[in-house]
Image (cartoon, rainbow, N blue to C red):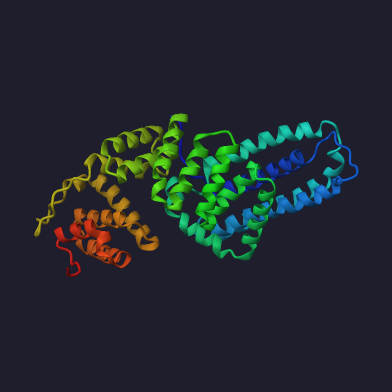
Amino acid sequence: MQKTGFSVSPMMIWPLIILISGITFAALIFSARRNSSQEPGEGTESPEDFVDDDIQKTEEHFKLQLAGIEADLKVGKLNEIDAENAKAELARELLHHRALLKNAVKAVEKPWTGIALVGASVLTIGVAIGFYLILGTPDDTVLVRVGDMQAQAQAQVEMGEEFEAALAKVEAQMRIDPEDVQGWQVLAPAYIRAGRFDDAVNAYRKIVELAPLTADTQTDLAEALLMSGQEEDLNEVMSLLGAAVNMDPTHARSRFYLAAEATRSADWDTAIKHWEELLALGDGTEPWYDTAKSGLAIARARGETPQPLTTPPVTSQPPVLADPEQADLIRSMVAGLDERLNSEGGTVEEWTRLVRSYIVMGDIEAAQKNYDSALAAYPAKEARQELDAVAREAGLKIPAE
């Protein structure tokens, strides 16, 4: 069975990203900027001028990589030792590419250099993009990419002027050459980290427009649209995810989002189908596997639970929680929703789902606590009519009418 997990050891993936990114940038710079048949003449820059400019561009890219390491350290994805090792590897690659660029002046004038570098760039771009899109950021999973996105973005913002200056320089270069797909592939995830979700949407749209269409690129754009939080984008999100699955039926990330959305919207039959198809892709070791099992359990239960009893017998449990394994999965999912809403906020529908879940589980204290938090987030009662109805029916304390 094909393994479809997304998690990789941080200490293993950062050197891979650094190495592949460095090779890619060197190949791109040489192949894009030099024509081996062109002779220097009036009105043209010398190879030395090109190299100085290329060194600057390469170093801007490495600054973005450094900011990524710092951000992952801040949000706990890397420990201090791994972060220092990753920085050391980044520094070694930067020094190597400085030397490589400086020594390239003579090589670029050889007749076959341009052809060889074009071939190298195609190969290295494919490898680098493949590693990034398959593996995501270090120690990343589908769930972490959604749940921790705002925390990562905030960490990037706190990096301060160095990250912003590097980002601004890449943006300036893209204004000069907006057809450079590799530039957009650098900017898009940087925008996500910086919390600039609308800019990320635009960057991913350029990637979809300029690069060969894949299940990954369509899912990346769908993720950015979800992060931008525009309700009117949902139809486009679902269309992109559906197209990604049609293009690659083994694409776990797009299937996960489709299953989650069907569950959220209570389209139980569709949710069951998506969760079952997703689980069929795994072998139980994937980081998303347990959550998918939890999602399938909830979909099969169809959200239907009996009304809680005023004085339930000590041994009674709602049927949806009767299976101990299923109960643990559901509690884990509810706890994750609780943590996210109380740290990052959410929609009134999400708060309603959380309060209802605690009521179903019989944890009235947690239900009341989260209902009170939802009141603080949505003080206008017109916006929370369903939430109030759920709380009233369960006997929670609600504001006077």
Number of marks in picture: 0
Q: Position of residue 155 (x, y in %)?
A: 52, 61
Quadrant where the C terminus is found in the figure: bottom left
* Residue beneath the point at 60% across and 58% down: 67
The residue positioned 50% from the left and 61% from the top of the image is 154
- Which of the 4 image quarters holds residue 351? bottom left
Please state which of residues 304 and 197 is positioned toward the viewer in this rendering.
Answer: 197
Rendered image quadrant of residue 64: bottom right
Q: Residue 105: which quarter of the image?
A: top right
Question: Between residues 85 and 348, which one lies in front from this camera angle?
Answer: 348
Q: Judge whether 65 appears above or below 259 on screen.
A: below
Percent x, y for residue 9?
53, 47
Q: Residue furthest right?
A: 41
Residue at 66%, 49% in the rendered image: 174
Q: From this viewpoint, is residue 319 visible?
A: yes
Q: Is residue 245 left or right of residue 331?
A: right
Tell me where residue 97 appears, x and y as whole percent: 75, 48
Name the residue: 64% across, 43% down: 182
